[in-house]
Image (cartoon, coloured by chain):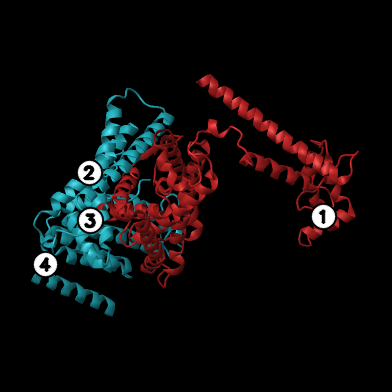
Chain colours: A red, B cyan
Amino acid sequence: MHIPDGYLSPATCAVTFAAVLPFWYVALKKVDRQLNTRMVPLLAVFSAFSFVIMMFNLPLPGGTTGHAAGLAIAAIVLGPWAGMLAISIALLIQAVFFGDGGISTLAANCLNMGVIGVGVAYLVYRLVAGRAALASPRRVVAAALAGYVAINVAALATAIEFGVQPIWFSAPDGTPLYAPYPLAIAIPAMMIGHLGVAGLAEAAISAGLVAWLQRSDPALLRASAPGASEVTDAVEATPAPGWSGARRLWATLALLMVLTPAGLVATGVAWGEWGSADFADPGMREEIALASGGQMPPEQVPSGLDALASLWNSPIPDYEVPFLPGGAGYVLSAMLGTGLVILFWLAAAWLVGRTRGQQA
Amino acid sequence: MAEQSFLPHRHRRRGFLERLTGDLLAVMEHALLAERLATRPGLLQRFDPRVRLVAMLVLIGATVAAGQLAAVYGLLALAVVLAALSRIPVALLARGVWLGVLLFTGILALPALFLVPGEAVARLPVLGWPVSAQGLASAAFLVGRALAAASFAALLILSTPWPHLLKAMQVLGLPTVLVVILGMTYRYIFLLLNTAQGLFAGRQSRQVGRLPGRAQRRLVASGAGLLLSGSMRLADEVFLAMQSRGYRGRHHSLVDFRMARPDWAALAVLAAAVALALAY
């Protein structure tokens, strides 16, 4: 992820510097306004922490190890602007003092990890965590997702910067002057490692740290949790007066069920949802051709489709219940389907609770 | 694959705790070595830190911008000459910088020999894959640039103590507040590295046998959490200590640089070299 010197052209380095500069400026102004004289020690110590955390090698399932980058942790504990600065400062020291990442590519590294990585981590964390209590397990899941998505988006940005080099910066005889691999190679090469290893390391350290902070120092989770209460799940589970989050969800679900017959208004056939009988029906054949850009379906039913068609017969085919009018059949199907999904999750939750109880 | 770095990755260690504490120790060892070398007398050390910083940045810029392979490798040779004249052991440069570059960039550049389309100049024995001239040149560019730029970056830090380098950064327009933060960050890195190293070394000393993967991950996460909690408390204490000593948000530096005749001469040589490079 740390791009060394020589991989990016001077023009790319200049563009990334121009792109990252406004973020640094705004971040410095915002953080200075928020923290004033407290900014210097806080950023210094947190940047030092970010640097040290980047040295941690995390063992992953399967025997491999991955380095954490601490992007999500910076976003969660400090918020996006101070987090951006802390990661950039840690990257600067890494580049100048320890050769992790180049000096000419420092702005690109800060853009990928500091700005994009921390920004994405903050957005994902806020989006997934919502207004959950500080001690809620949802925050642990949100931190894991934030870390995983942030590191992968940052890796994608890095891969794109690598991949455009041979397109724009090659000698007249076709020799790539910088990173030699085009987008088609750079993107999969970067993403496989990050989707499989680095992303998991970042997810594990982010989730582990948030879980630890929930138990030991929940106040540190406050910066990225406006509106969240510090109550535990047990307290939160008691029914609150008024419209709680769960009640709103139930109401939305009911509304969606009632609205299911709206699908009947749509005309034509859903592409790819054809039965074997549809191939013999001239009207349906016309509709299939219309939905397939004028391509007529084969005369005969494909043998595989024909063989598998009778494997399972739906108890309510096409959401139509024989003794009910069309629209009501849709609503009944929606209720049945939703009920089955809820039953499945209740059973799964009961099983998980039982297993945990046995472990304890 | 480990990333390109001046820090050695000692993969011979078997346990994960040994590896973790070893990596943390390697950072401290590198920093101590850099500080010791930076105080030795030598060619680079004689110049004003501002001149050193500007010169190394110009040389890194030239390495990245050079369009000819001869220029890239000529700059690498210049880095070796500068190291020798500055009493920075070339063997250290080779072990600490080039080995890391070759292990990372060298391996990364290898497939380019076959993947970059162009005129075939050789074939890989047994497999018969064609090696293109363009692929060969692009790999040579990538490795040469990475070697030369990393050498100049290493020369800068091995010839300049960190506080001097920070002060010199102000010449480039870096705000004073950032220079102060960078200076403090550098100091606290060692405090936190020491704490983390002590934490994991303590755990390692009480450890018999191997920990399962899940327990290892929990150990790293709780170690990081403890460090984070401690860091935030430390930030509060440092702030109070700064306030009690009269800190009101204004920053001053105790180091004062003066440009001498050799500094101006070095700048003139550098400017002439840049002008020549731009002309050709």
Label 4 Cα neighbours within 10 Å, binned few <14 / some 14-19 / many ≥20: few
Horizontal arrangement in the rendering, residue A65 relative to residue A238 (left or right)? left
| SS class, disc 4 | loop
| Residue labelled with disc 3 | B154
Note whether residue B106 is visible: no
Q: What residue type is labelled 4?
A: Arg
Q: Distance between the residues labelled 2 and 3?
A: 16 Å
* Disc 4: host chain: B
In this rendering, the label closer to the viewer, 4 or 3 = 4
Q: Distance between the residues labelled 4 and 3?
A: 24 Å
Q: Which mark is residue B28?
A: 2
Horizontal arrangement in the rendering, residue A340 relative to residue A98 (left or right)? right
Q: Which amino acid does label 2 sit on?
A: Met
Q: Do the residues at discs 4 and 2 belong to one chain?
A: yes
Q: Residue A265 carries which label?
A: 1
| Residue labelled with disc 4 | B258
Q: Position of residue B182 (x, y in %)?
A: 26, 54
